[in-house]
Amino acid sequence: MNKEIKDRFEYAKSFYKKLNIDVDKVLERVRKIPISVNCWQGDDVKGFMNNSQPLSGGIMVTGNHPGAARNPYELRQDLEKVFSLIPGNHKLNLHAIYIDSDEKIDIDQIEPKHYKGWVDWAKKINIGLDFNPTLFSHNMYKDGFTLSHPDKKIRDFWINHCQRSIKVAEYFATELKQKCVNNLWIPDGYKDFTVDKFSPRKRLKESLNSIYAIDYDKSKVLNTMESKLFGIGIEAYTVGSNEFYLSYAIENKTGLCMDMGHFHPTEQCSQKVSTVMNFIDELLLHMTRPMRWDSDHVVSLDDETQEMTSEIIRNNFEDRIHIALDFFDATINRLAAWVIGTRNVIKSIVKSCLEPTSILKQFELSNDFTSRLAIIEEQKSFPWVDVWNYYCEQEGVPYDGAWLEEIKEYERNVQFKRKR
Ligand code: RNT
Ligand code: ZN
């Protein structure tokens, strides 16, 4: 262990002790919080189906940085590099289109066996897996609709796909001995003024009822649904709105997903956590950074990220809130995007865990708002970074920007040698 890092950690430890914070316990806590890393940052949400269509559904990846993974082996190779630069033990979040199979199947034929390569690999590197049915970039995503399409044949196609996804999620949980979050997001909606807003939502409700009616082990699979305000070309009306899924989740005791980029730009997703946690058991977060719209920028160590992790930590919600990433940037090295975004979320968790929350709560309860604001602001320059550095050293990953040189080397030796 680097002596300077150790000395600075000892200083931080005594500093935080005065605030009644046990830094060793903090690191134990941080170590137990997994981040579900989105596989789709590695190849611009393309996936490995033989019949895949261009990315659709109102989401978009911009940029053409060379060296994107072209198959499961390359994606795993990239992810191993990424996980070696991030402290802690995490999860990989797979989308259904990331099959690892030579069989030429369509999305409505997926079975656990088509993902066995991922499970074997997850066991080898000791990570968990989460899952998502894929209801876009496909020719059965018709006229802008999937599970709420007026045509029953189209709805049934997607219901079947979603039911199969639950089975894949259950398989992941059984094999890896940890709960699998299975998140559903659909792009359904209209570009312009919509006359019948009720019927599509009624159909969506019925489709969800059919999907979740299948037999599966609820202790193994957490089903969540992800709401959205709008997408590109779906500006006017989104079937799967926040009110819709929140109501559905409460009535049917399912999980819920909130993506930080899926609200009006003047709304903050972090402010909604304390509401929904009063009514639902488990929440999935898609951590991302919206810039003016749902732009899926790499997570920054900014105020909203901090506010979000603090909502989890202050309320001891880490067993009920699952953290996943959802960004896709191809203007920069895709591995660097993963490393930057994931490290930022973990840094933010470390900072939140080092907050003197009980002291702040006392100020709040006694209406001492001066002290509350003073400490909220002062703690931004408390020695949390010494704790982060020590954590990285302990976990055998670079504590500073040294990871960047490793990525550059990987770029030269691996990514830039991949032909399109
Ligand atoms: C889209 C949603 C969704 C997707 C992934 C690829 O707006 O955020 O989570 O990003 O399913
Ligand atoms: Zn999302």
Image (cartoon, grey):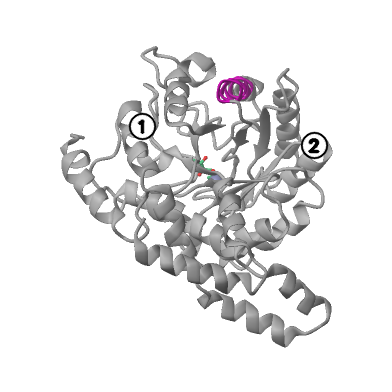
Which residue has dot 1 on it?
A: 76
- Residue 259 x %, y %: 59, 51
Which residue has dot 2 on it?
A: 253
Q: Residues within 10 Å of mark 1 (few under 14, many from 20)?
A: some
The N terminus sits in image quarter: bottom left
Which structural element holds mark 1?
Answer: helix
Whichever of labels 1 and 2 marks the residue nearer the N terminus, that label is 1
Specify the amino acid type for callout 2: Lys
Q: Residue at x 55, y 56 (%)?
A: 261
Q: Quadrant of residue 54?
A: top left
Residue 115 sits above or below residue 208 on the image: above
Which structural element holds mark 2?
Answer: loop
The stretch in magenta equals 163-176
Does residue 218 belong to the magenta stretch?
no
- Residue 257 x %, y %: 65, 45
Asked if residue 5 lies left or right of residue 178, the reply is left
Q: Residue 43: in sight, yes or no?
A: no
Judged by depth in the image, the label closer to the viewer, 1 or 2, is 1
Residue 157 sits above or below residue 292 on the image: above
Asked if residue 183 lies left or right of residue 104, the reply is right
Q: Residue at x 50, y 55 (%)?
A: 346
